[in-house]
Image (cartoon, rainbow, N blue to C red):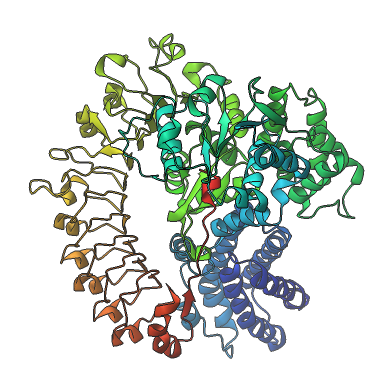
Amino acid sequence: MAFNDFFAGEIATELLKMLINISRKSLLCRASADQLITYIHDLLPTIEEIKYSGVELPAQRQSQLMRLSELLRSGVDLSHKVLASSRWNVYRNLHLAKKMDKLEKTVSKFLLGPMQAHIMADVHHARFEMAERFDRVDNSIHRLEQYFGNIKIGVGGGGWVEEAVRSVDEDVVDGSSAVGLGFGKIKVREMVVGREDLWVVGISGIGGSGKTTLAREVCKDHQVRCYFRERILFLTVSQSPNVEQLRTKIWGYIMGNERLDANYVVPQWMPQFECKSEAARTLIVLDDVWTLSVVEQLVCRIPGCKFLVVSRSKFQTVLSYEVELLSEEDALSLFCHHAFGQKSIPSAANENLVKQVVTECGRLPLALKVIGASLRDQTEMFWLSVKNRLSQGQSIGESHEINLIERMAISINYLPEKIKECFLDLCSFPEDKKIPLDVLINIWVEIHDIPETEAYAIVVELSNKNLLTLMKEARAGGMYSSCFEISVTQHDVLRDLALNLSNRASINERRRLVMPKRENGIPKEWLRYKHKQFEAQIISIHTGEMKDVDWYNLEFPKAEVLIINFTSSEYFLPPFINRMPNLRALIIINYSATYACLHNISVFKNLSNLRSLWLEKVSTPELSGIVLENLGKLFIVLCKINNSLVEKEVDIAQVFPNLSELTLDHCDDLTQFPSSICGMKSLQNLSLTNCHNLTQLPLELGKLKSLEILRLYACPDLKTLPNSICDMVRLKYIDISQCVNLTCFPEETGRLVSLEKIDMRECSMIRNVPNSALSLQSLRLVICDEEVSGIWKEVEKAKPNVHIQVSEQYFDLDWLKE
């Protein structure tokens, strides 16, 4: 039977070998590959029996075997693509994983259906126990959800996002991010340390030339750190600075009181007599300064204090080092690092073509990074196409920043459409501000109708292409960070690029309507077209205080995301929110030093389709009479609660009947959590973090049967956990780190059958774990300090799969990025 010889001897054997390689290489495809290997191992003996049984199968059976042959041949083709795909191409790997899952399900259905019903009937002595095997096949969609659930809690390799963060850190450690800045570092260090006659010096250069990178390298220099005795403050000023807030930060740092009250009035000239002695040398770095007037408001002559001003402009009154373009050798090295993962041109690459592309990048670090990363793992034809597009434009010169944007736009236009749109969405956030990863993911899920899995993959893809930067909070055990602790930043030139590309349509037809910097009111450009409806899907507003009379009768019927950024203690919410029937995500962020009081709260009553709400640095509004039926995610950050959540007449479960995720972070006046929350049947993620005055949780908290993630990080006044949490049979992760007054776990902790991860760093009061902990059948990871790690030894001994991770002291360098 020649057909069966071909089937058994070639297709199945070839596919089997490839699946074994995939199982070793691809984390995402491993489960599907392993299951397909099982199918083929069990299928081969049956095919052999058909082959040698002498039974001539009917035409219909032959047709079914041919269908199976075609199916497995498609598996061979798919396997080729999986094995050829680079580990860096996360977005492509996600789609290949989905195709592999689909292949597995198709094979499964075929074997359970025609293959089992007909071929098995014709080969009576086949011993293929299909029914029993398929009872053990996990649902493929569930597997993907579980994998990305691991990303959220930071276990099981957790994956892509963590790896992308680590790759950024590795670039910093090995010096890849500072190629060609050695000479500049020496010159700036001489001005900062060697010239005591200078109290303000500068770094200047065009956008993308590496000014900020150079400033950070100077701050990390051993000689500089010793000279200033680690007293270095790094501040980002930006185009729309809050000068008074910056002055307060500078003055507080100089005085040794970094927690100055927001209402503290800084002396106009910061007089000498209020500062410490000259021995307290201090370096103040002001990054991304745009105007001389801002410099004059922020710097002053104080003994022992020196200012380093970083700007695109060269101010005449400031002695500055102008950042030079990279040498040809350094430009090639930096480009190769991002295009090939090494510092030179690989032997298999077209050397002339590579050098031509490098030349077109104009020896600017940002262009070399972005364009190099966009060409990684691409074919030579793709490289040639990009080179031709680059060569059609004007050369990048020191006075041609717009040409830099046009060059990088070429690499953006080669992105898959959905990834390109997600990149352009980043311009909707204010310059030089951290974007919480949760906010970005929620927006993309809502406006692009994609699952969280794909949104995470796009984040990492953009990071790998140097189009955004992932940053994690500085916490011990950082390799086990969850996505909750990660934020996104973007180079201001890349934001300019996204704005440039987004604003090419007429203002009423733009998909994103963005105020690029803070203004006093609605831009005149918007008002010229107020008689027409705006087609924008994303609206981003950035103003100071706004009153009822400051808003105009604008119409945004298609808006799905509204981002409100402001700097004020009073803010009247825009009336046009009432006329946004499709609004899904609302982000309200106050950048002033004091809590803002929101007015016109009645607009919340009409947000029937709102699914995600983020409130930051505001006094939370009264909730009585408001029902947000479809709200799934609520984030309350740095807010004043004012008992708005604990009033007897407010039933939180009725206000948010379908809430799945609730976060309260840095809410200092939260002393107790409302018991009405326990009625939220759909709540899966509860985070109460940095709530320093929280003293107790509701006794009936265990009624949250759907809860999977419970974060109680840095709640030092919390002394006990309610026993009822042991009823949370779906709980996967609990974080009690820095709850320094917690003394024990509930006795019946072992009933948490789904618990995978416990984070208890800086919980030195907990001196034992209950005996029931031996029953934690799903536990995989415990993070704790060395002094308490011994209490887990019995659990670790009884359960080899449990890893006790002792946290190490973590030195925070995040001040370099603030």
Q: Quadrant of the N terminus?
A: bottom right
Instruction: Please provide percent x and percent y for residue 313.
Output: 65, 23
Question: Can you see residue 449?
Answer: no
Left or right: 414, with 118 as reference point: right
Q: Is residue 168 above or below residue 605?
A: below
**Residue at (29% x, 23% y) in the render:** 574
Left or right: 752, with 191 as reference point: left
Q: Is residue 91 above or below residue 610?
A: below
Instruction: Please provide percent x and percent y for residue 24.
Output: 66, 73
Give whichever of 153, 291 is nearer the camera.
Answer: 291
Residue 328: quarter of image: top right
Instruction: Please provide percent x and percent y for residue 459.
Output: 55, 48
**Residue at (41% x, 40% y) in the render:** 252
**Residue at (43% x, 30% y) in the render:** 271
Give whichever of 517, 172 is nearer the camera.
Answer: 172
Report the number of discs.
0
Q: Is residue 648 above or below residue 29?
A: above
Question: Can you see residue 422?
Answer: yes
Residue 727: quarter of image: bottom left
Instruction: Please provide percent x and percent y for residue 742.
Output: 27, 70
Left or right: 696, with 356 as reference point: left
Give whichever of 73, 791 is nearer the camera.
Answer: 791
